Amino acid sequence: MWKSGVSGEMIARSFMFSYLPHADYPLNLIHVAVAIETKFDIEVIMEECDCVPREITAQLACSDWVAYILINKFHHLNKKRFGICHEFGHLLLEHKHGNLYPGSSEPDEEKDEANNFAAALLMPSNLVYSLARRYSDNFTYLIQKMTQYFKVSTEAAARRLVDTDYMPGLIALVDPYLGRLNWEYHSPSLMLDRESFREFLVQYFAQPKKREENLEIMGYPFKIEAKRIWGNKYLLACVPYTMSIKCLKESASGYSGK
């Protein structure tokens, strides 16, 4: 049994080291399910259906002998993969709740732990670091490579990248025509608040002729990358000029895979 208080990240690493030390990526989730069956001596069944609530990607139901994961058939494959690994996280973290039935909700702590587990399982730190070193000059392209290499959503890849803090920065999905911020994540090392970022977005998209120039968020000079990814939505990446690429090497010490 895992020690209480151990993070989802650490449990994912320990599980992979013990049961799937030579796994290839993108991760084969059937292999993960078999490893869980071996660990807990249960059967893991994964099935797509149209009975899962629209806003939910996967649901977990357990008995003494079976772990049953229902998957929303209408969601994108990459989103399904993260949802399944989220439910794997509930199993391996031995959570008592989880998303068990329509209308139910997970305790925030369990949800965060399961999300951290899923991110670490699908996108190991050493492989994220390797890709970050290779594509350090282009944040938006790096995110695209992560989605392809790990078969995860754009949002999952962006959040994982900034959470590692290998390359300090801020990534967001925005719709400038509707003035909508779909999501935004920034590195722990950057002291930014959501309201300040919204002000920055107004400044950025209101001055299209100045998009190639230095802009500031709360006094930080930022390099800006914007890439239209679908419809009117843009993937926006902001990297502080004051943070040299040396930050990548220093912050990722110990994860080079050497």
Image (cartoon, helix red, strand yellow):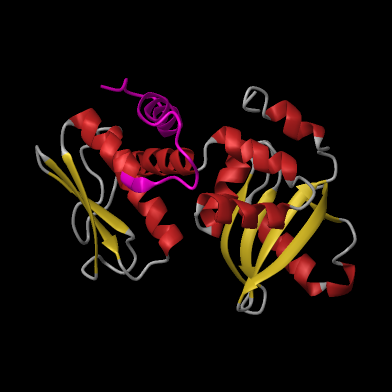
Q: Position of residue 38 (x, y in %)?
A: 23, 31
Vertical arrangement, residue 108 with respect to residue 148, above or below: above
The residue at the point 15 percent across, 37 percent down is 42
Determine which quarter of the picture holds residue 95: top left
Residue nearest the viewer, comparing 48 with 226: 48
Magenta-drawn segment: 1-30
The residue at the point 47 percent across, 38 percent down is 120
Q: Position of residue 81 (x, y in %)?
A: 40, 54
Counting labels gives: 0
The N terminus lies in quadrant: top left
Q: Image check: 194 left or right of 51?
A: right
Determine which quarter of the picture holds residue 248: top right
Vertical arrangement, residue 237 with respect to residue 114, above or below: below
The C terminus lies in quadrant: top right
Q: Image check: 175 left or right of 213?
A: left
Q: Image check: 125 left or right of 66?
A: right
Residue 95 seen by the camera: no
Vertical arrangement, residue 253 with respect to residue 68, above or below: above
The residue at the point 32 percent across, 61 percent down is 56
Determine which quarter of the picture holds residue 230: bottom right
Is 7 inside the magenta-drawn segment?
yes
Residue 112 seen by the camera: yes
Residue nearest the viewer, comparing 47 with 98: 47
Q: Position of residue 106 (x, y in %)?
A: 29, 48
Residue nearest the viewer, comparing 106 with 51: 51
The residue at the point 39 percent across, 24 percent down is 6
Q: Image check: 155 left or right of 200?
A: left
Vertical arrangement, residue 144 with respect to residue 131, above or below: below
Is 214 inside the magenta-drawn segment?
no
